[in-house]
Image (cartoon, grey):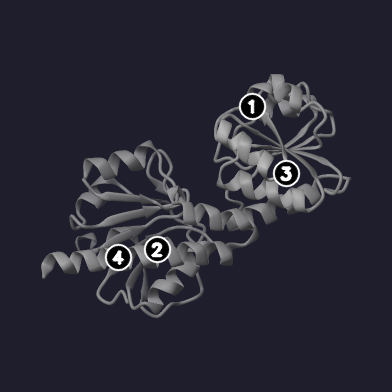
């Protein structure tokens, strides 16, 4: 249980509603900031403006998956007002206050470092990333069906990267009957691709390997699908970029060539917000309970 814990949930989308539901069930007291347009009410959760919250009593701050932007603004789809997390707000919290976010950036890293507050990036955790790969793959399949005039079965699909998402994408498209090739750099990844019954290629050979692909799915968060690579693709190729913004594709050149290229980060929150929210809620409740036990142990 989280009895006695006070948490500020700042902004977010439908995924945060599952987090709020789970934490209130565990008896935590929640302050919902940026939720004034939300009709639903939760027992144990109070909607409040950020300036009216006493952060000196806040044990944890939960941000949306994207965290903040580079100016500290927090995405709030349930609010008509802008909400900012500042260094001054963090400095006013207790020393044990932990900030939970999906990912981070230089701004969030800076204010947590300057105030000596712990920052937990949920998407750095293997369990969260692996669970999230499931709705990500389903969303990718949906996009592939919507934006092509041929079946996945029998098509050539090139997956770039064999990380936690890349592995799930490659395995699922293979199961649907696609001819899947997977690009990687590490020798152990190339070996794993072969073990999975798929065709590996080194990313140094991407331009050559991509010349007859029907669907290119990128999971690598830096520009790898360059103009030189896109120039070798067939005109009908569909690019689905799953990497975090700004993606790993030269979208300007893709448009110039007439190749459809879609940037699709955050698919779990779009195609399955309830499931994606439950994944975050379960991990957050576990982390908060562990943090509470540690604090209680230090006070005994």
Of pointers 3 and 4, the one earlier in the residue sequence = 3
**Nearer mark to the viewer, of 2 and 4:** 4
- Residue on which the image places disc 1: 203
In three-dimensional space, the C-alpha distance between marks 1 and 4, rounded to whole angstroms, equals: 41 Å
The quarter of the picture where the C terminus appears is: bottom left
Of pointers 2 and 4, the one earlier in the residue sequence = 2
Circle 1 sits in a helix, a strand or a loop, which is it? helix
Of pointers 2 and 1, the one earlier in the residue sequence = 1
**Nearer mark to the viewer, of 2 and 1:** 1
Q: Residues within 10 Å of mark 2 (few under 14, many from 20)?
A: some
In the rendered structure, the answer to whether residue 152 lies left or right of residue 113 reads: right
Which residue appears at 55% of the width and 35% of the height?
Answer: 221
- Residue on which the image places disc 4: 290
Q: Residues within 10 Å of mark 1 (few under 14, many from 20)?
A: some
In three-dimensional space, the C-alpha distance between marks 3 and 4, rounded to whole angstroms, equals: 40 Å
- Residue on which the image places disc 2: 284
- Residue on which the image places disc 3: 197
In the rendered structure, the answer to whether residue 233 lies left or right of residue 223 reads: right
Question: On screen, 278 above or below 24?
Answer: above
Q: Position of residue 129 (x, y in %)?
A: 52, 52
Of pointers 3 and 2, the one earlier in the residue sequence = 3
């Amino acid at each position: 249980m989280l009895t006695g814990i006070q948490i500020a949930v700042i902004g977010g989308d439908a995924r945060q509603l599952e987090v709020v539901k789970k934490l209130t069930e565990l008896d935590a007291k929640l302050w919902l900031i940026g939720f004034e347009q939300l009709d639903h009410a939760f027992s144990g959760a109070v909607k409040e403006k950020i300036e009216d919250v006493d952060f000196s009593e806040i044990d944890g701050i939960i941000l949306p998956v994207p965290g903040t932007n580079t100016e500290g603004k927090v995405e709030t789809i349930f609010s008509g007002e802008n909400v900012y997390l500042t260094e001054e707000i963090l400095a006013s919290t207790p020393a044990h206050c932990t900030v939970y976010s999906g990912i981070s950036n230089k701004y969030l890293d800076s204010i947590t470092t300057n105030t000596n507050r712990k920052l937990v990036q949920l998407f750095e955790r293997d369990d969260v990333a692996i669970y999230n790969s499931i709705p990500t793959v389903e969303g990718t399949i949906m996009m592939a069906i919507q934006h092509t005039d041929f079946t996945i079965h029998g098509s050539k699909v090139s997956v770039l990267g064999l990380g936690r998402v890349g592995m799930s994408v490659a395995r699922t498209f293979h199961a649907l009957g696609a001819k899947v090739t997977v690009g990687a750099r590490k020798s152990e990844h190339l070996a794993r691709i072969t073990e999975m019954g798929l065709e590996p290629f080194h990313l140094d050979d991407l331009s050559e390997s991509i010349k007859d692909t029907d669907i290119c799915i990128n999971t690598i968060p830096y520009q790898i699908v360059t103009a030189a690579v896109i120039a070798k693709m067939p005109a009908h190729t569909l690019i689905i970029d799953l990497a975090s913004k700004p993606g790993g594709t030269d979208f300007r050149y893709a448009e110039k060539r007439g190749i459809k290229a879609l940037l699709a980060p955050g698919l779990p929150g779009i195609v399955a917000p309830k499931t994606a929210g439950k994944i975050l809620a379960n991990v957050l409740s576990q982390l908060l309970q562990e943090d509470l036990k540690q604090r209680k142990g230090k006070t005994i």
